[in-house]
Image (cartoon, rainbow, N blue to C red):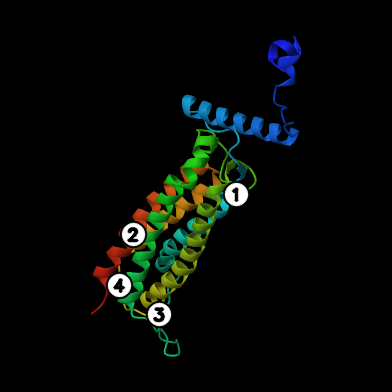
């Protein structure tokens, strides 16, 4: 039979049968197309992808307080100008050499400078962008910095917490060893040097009592760390031979 003999319904009889497309496949294809379009729009506009996963940021004060406490451990040398006592015969001798203790304490102060710099440039930069660094922003206080950050930055937070805590432990031990050696008469520095440590103490106290902003506290902490580094280095020239 020819197509002409088949009549008007002939061509339909020779058309191939189409297979039904599963609904799930159509849904996946539509979602994929939407995702591609969304990425293209993000690249074209430069706007952040609203689908980027974020989490509540851990309280940044938990990073800063150990760092400030480490500064205070070094600044505690100021107490030698007021409460130091003469060495007694039954006092146990310090096991570390003064030169080693001062060297380690100087390293601690330098590491604190670097820590405050990392806080400001890394994790802190995310907080400044989200309002924590604005004038009149949230003060140095727990519970007022509940900001959202990309989840990938959480490891950075953990690293800063670990380094801040480790520095607190180191400075507490190294400053104690230096104070013991000075009290035992291995070093005689003028009162002006210890007054310098006292001034650093007052600046640290001001951060806590006046509830300055988080950004100001980080920047001031970096400045205090630099000042303490210079003071510890200055102690070397007063060591007895």
Classed neighbour count for the residue bearing mark 1: other residues with Cα under 10 Å, few (<14), some (14–19), many (≥20): some
User: What SS does tag 1 mark?
Assistant: loop
Q: Position of residue 110 (x, y in %)?
A: 35, 59
> Which mark is in front, 2 or 4?
2
- Viewer can see residue 9: yes
Quarter of the image with the C terminus is bottom left
Of marks 4 and 1, which one's residue comes earlier in the chain?
A: 1
Q: Which residue is mark 4?
A: 188
**In this figure, which residue is indicated by the disc labeled 2?**
229
Q: In percent of the image, x 51 and y 61: which residue is there? A: 162
Q: Are marks 3 and 2 in contact (CB under 8 Å)?
A: no
Q: Residue at x 71, y 28 (%)?
A: 18
The image shows residue 1 at horizontal and vertical percentages of 72, 18
Give the spatial CA distance, label 3 vs label 4. 12 Å
The numbered mark, 3 or 2, whose residue comes first in the sequence reads 3
* Tag in front: 4 or 1: 1
């Amino acid at each position: 039979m020819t197509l002409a003999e088949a009549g008007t319904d002939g061509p339909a009889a020779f058309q191939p049968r189409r297979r039904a497309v599963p609904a799930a496949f159509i849904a996946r294809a539509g979602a994929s197309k939407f995702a591609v379009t969304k990425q293209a729009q993000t690249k074209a506009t430069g706007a952040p992808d609203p689908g980027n996963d974020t989490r509540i940021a851990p309280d940044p004060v938990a990073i800063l307080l150990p760092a400030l406490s480490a500064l205070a451990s070094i600044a505690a040398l100021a107490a030698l100008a007021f409460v130091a006592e003469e060495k007694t015969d039954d006092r146990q001798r310090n096991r570390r050499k003064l030169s080693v203790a001062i060297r380690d304490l100087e390293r601690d102060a330098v590491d604190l400078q670097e820590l405050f710099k990392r806080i400001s440039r890394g994790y802190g930069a995310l907080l400044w962008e989200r309002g924590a660094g604005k004038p009149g922003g949230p003060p140095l206080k727990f519970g007022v910095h509940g900001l959202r950050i990309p989840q990938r930055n959480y490891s950075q937070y953990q690293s800063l917490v670990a380094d801040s805590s480790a520095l607190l432990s180191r400075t507490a031990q190294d400053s104690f060893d230096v104070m013991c050696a000075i009290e035992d008469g291995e070093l005689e520095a003028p009162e002006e040097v210890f007054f310098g440590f006292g001034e650093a103490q007052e600046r640290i106290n001001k951060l806590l009592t006046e509830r300055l902003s988080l950004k100001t506290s980080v920047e001031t902490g970096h400045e205090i760390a630099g000042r303490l580094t210079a003071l510890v280095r200055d102690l070397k020239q007063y060591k007895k031979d």
